[in-house]
Amino acid sequence: MPKPAKLKDLLQPGNRDLGRVLARAAELEALTEKVQAALGEPESGHIVAVSTDQESLTVTVDAAAWAARLRFLENEIRAAAGPGMATKKLLVRVRPPAPP
């Protein structure tokens, strides 16, 4: 098993691994914003994040009541997320806000 990279090495300017992580984070942030904009209020205010991988499109919300509601908006979510999402499994997850 390969040894994990040292943090100081990862944070060096020009590090390609860090660049890929930052690019993926920006991609997921843009995806979240697209879905939020397409759904509008009040639903968009309860979407914490939207992510995708090879098999699924995952929408994370801040309360179970909104998870149920967003499942009914599956077609709108897929359309907003873009091409290629029709074949992915839609998952709606709940992640309550962190306590103050």
Image: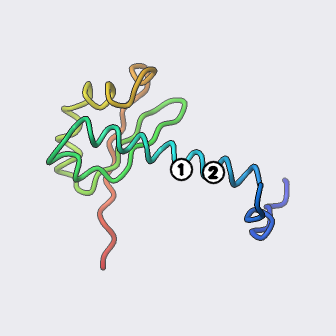
> Residue 82, image x and y in percent?
40, 26
The C terminus lies in which quarter of the figure?
Answer: bottom left
Query: Residue reaching furthest bottom?
Result: 100
Q: Residue at x 33, y 58 (%)?
A: 95
Q: Residue at x 35, y 44 (%)?
A: 33
SS class, disc 1: helix
- Say left or right for 19 vs 50: right
Q: Nearer the viewer, residue 52 or 21?
A: 21
- Say left or right for 52 vs 21: left
SS class, disc 2: helix
- Say left or right for 13 vs 32: right
Residue 21 got which mark?
A: 2
Query: Residue reaching furthest right?
Result: 2
Mark 1, Cα crowd under 10 Å, few <14 / some 14-19 / many 20+, is: few
Q: Nearer the viewer, residue 75 or 11?
A: 11
> Residue 7, image x and y in percent?
74, 68
Q: Is residue 7 above or below residue 100?
A: above
Q: CA distance from mark 1 to mark 2?
A: 6 Å
All told, the count of numbered labels is 2
> Residue 34, image x and y in percent?
34, 38
Q: Residue at x 80, y 62 (%)?
A: 5
Q: Is residue 78 above or below residue 44?
A: above
- Residue type at tag 2: Val
Mark 2, Cα crowd under 10 Å, few <14 / some 14-19 / many 20+, is: few
Q: Residue at x 52, y 35 (%)?
A: 53
Q: Are marks 1 and 2 in contact (CB under 8 Å)?
A: yes
- Residue type at tag 1: Ala
Q: Nearer the viewer, residue 57 or 42?
A: 42
Q: Is residue 87 above or below residue 49?
A: above
Residue 78 got which mark?
A: none
Identify residue for label 1.
25
Quarter where residue 92 is shown: top left
